Amino acid sequence: MIEKPTPPGDSECCEAGCEPCVWDIYYEDMREWKAAQEKLKAAQEAESADGKKTENADEKQAESPV
């Protein structure tokens, strides 16, 4: 899991218009972090759905006479 980026401290931005500014770097890191979180969530949901499919198939198999 990727650790959530920490915003720059109060004294880290000099407000001189640097390129890139520490805030630019932070916002880019946040975009990457959010994308990674969404990907992780989608993978977990897919895994959960696969588990439910397996459970349902197992239940149907247990119910059907052999």
Image (spheres, rainbow, N blue to C red):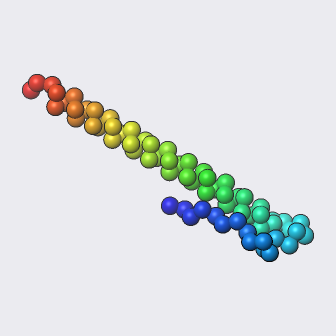
In the visual, does 7 lie left or right of 46? right
Quick one: which residue is furthest to the left in this view?
Answer: 66
* Residue at (56% x, 48% y) in the render: 38
* Residue at (50% x, 61% y) in the render: 1
Q: Where is residue 2 drawn, in percent x and y?
A: 55, 62
In the visual, does 12 lie left or right of 53? right
Q: Quadrant of the rendered structure where residue 5 is? A: bottom right
* Residue at (44% x, 43% y) in the render: 45
Quick one: which residue is furthest to the top in this view?
Answer: 65
Image vertical order of residue 34 relative to residue 19, above or below: above
Image vertical order of residue 58 relative to residue 39, above or below: above
Q: Where is residue 39 drawn, in percent x and y?
A: 53, 48
Q: Quadrant of the rendered structure where residue 50 is? A: top left
Q: Where is residue 53 drawn, in percent x and y?
A: 32, 35
Image vertical order of residue 26 relative to residue 42, above or below: below
Quick one: which residue is furthest to the bottom in this view?
Answer: 11
Quick one: which residue is furthest to the front in this view?
Answer: 10
Q: Where is residue 13 drawn, in percent x and y?
A: 82, 71
Image vertical order of residue 54 relative to residue 31, above or below: above
In the visual, does 25 lie left or right of 56? right
* Residue at (78% x, 71% y) in the render: 10
Which quadrant does the C terminus fall into? top left
